[in-house]
């Protein structure tokens, strides 16, 4: 790997128990380049770290970092951030998966840009894009969800995978990409304007009713 250039990472320190930390690697759509992998493996070897764990949000956590080594490990990997950028769970889509009905990667980047553009929000927003109804991108239970079908996209908003778990409100069925993105754009505006502090979109929709969300989109 001598000819591979190590690539810097943005990392979020996460406090664990007994003076131990994890570093959340802020990667997009769960994708790691070979340069990132070189950086990670060299850092793990240098500091004798043994656990790299995938998260449900398609990020990576480097676990088991003693507090007195935290700054050195951060410096080795790249730069620390105080808040992770919005995350999105994305399946491989029709270009790779035999079950996929729609391509997912490009539209996922567009969804992420909408999430960034419409903030700040009362609380976090998680998104999911799936190329078929098996929803490997967790689209049904994300704040923002897209599910691909043969004729277009189904759009969901306000799903939840927490203790009050539930499928999001369906905003559109078999719509075009542009229509789907417009619905997401307006729904994020609804949440930004109507949500309470530390209330996820599902809480806002449950409190005001799905009719309030659907009326906002008209």
Image: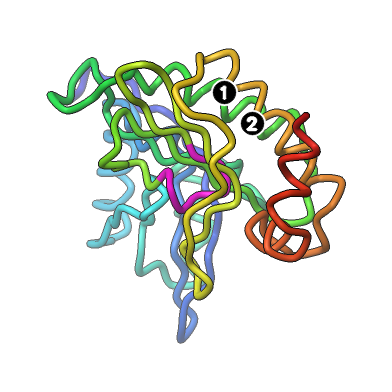
Q: Quadrant of residue 97?
A: top left
Q: Quadrant of residue 110?
A: top right
> Which residue corresponds to the image point at 25% horizontal and 41% vertical from the top-left?
134
Mark 2 residue element: helix
Query: Which residue is nearer to you in this view: 147 or 93?
Result: 147
Give yes or no for contact between labels 1 and 2 (Cβ–Cβ under 8 Å). Answer: yes
Q: Position of residue 153 (x, y in %)?
A: 44, 24
Q: Position of residue 55 (x, y in %)?
A: 36, 55
Q: Where residue 184 is drawn, which disc sits there?
A: 2
**Badge 2: few (under 14), some or many (20 or more) residues near its Cα, within 10 Å?**
many
Membership of 142 in magenta stretch: yes
Q: Residue furthest right?
A: 193
Q: Where residue 164 is drawn, which disc sits there?
A: none
Query: Could you tell whether 178 is left or right of 92 in the image?
Result: right
Q: Quadrant of residue 119?
A: top right
Q: Magenta span covers which residues? A: 139-145
Query: Could you tell whether 77 is left or right of 33 in the image?
Result: right
Up the image or down, 20 lies above or below 11; here it is below
The residue tagged 1 is 180
CA distance for labels 1 and 2: 6 Å
Image quarter where the N terminus lies is top left
Membership of 9 in magenta stretch: no
């Amino acid at each position: 790997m001598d000819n591979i250039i190590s690539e810097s990472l943005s990392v979020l320190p996460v406090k664990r128990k007994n003076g131990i930390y994890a570093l959340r690697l802020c990667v997009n759509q769960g994708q790691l380049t070979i340069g990132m992998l070189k950086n990670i493996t060299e850092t793990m070897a240098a500091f004798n770290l043994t656990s790299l764990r995938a998260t449900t949000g398609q990020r990576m956590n480097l676990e088991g970092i003693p507090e007195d080594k935290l700054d050195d490990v951060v410096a080795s990997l790249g730069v620390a951030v105080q808040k992770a950028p919005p995350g999105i769970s994305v399946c491989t889509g029709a270009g790779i998966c035999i079950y996929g009905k729609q391509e997912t990667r490009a539209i996922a980047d567009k969804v992420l840009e909408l999430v960034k553009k419409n903030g700040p929000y009362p609380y976090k927003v998680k998104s999911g894009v799936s190329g078929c109804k098996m929803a490997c991108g967790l689209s049904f239970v994300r704040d923002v969800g897209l599910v691909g079908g043969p004729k277009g996209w189904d759009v969901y908003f306000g799903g939840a995978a927490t203790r009050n778990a539930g499928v999001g409100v369906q905003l559109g069925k078999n719509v075009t990409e542009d229509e789907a993105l417009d619905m997401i754009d307006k729904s994020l505006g609804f949440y930004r304007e109507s949500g309470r502090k530390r209330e996820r979109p599902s809480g806002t929709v449950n409190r005001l009713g799905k009719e309030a969300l659907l009326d906002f989109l008209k």
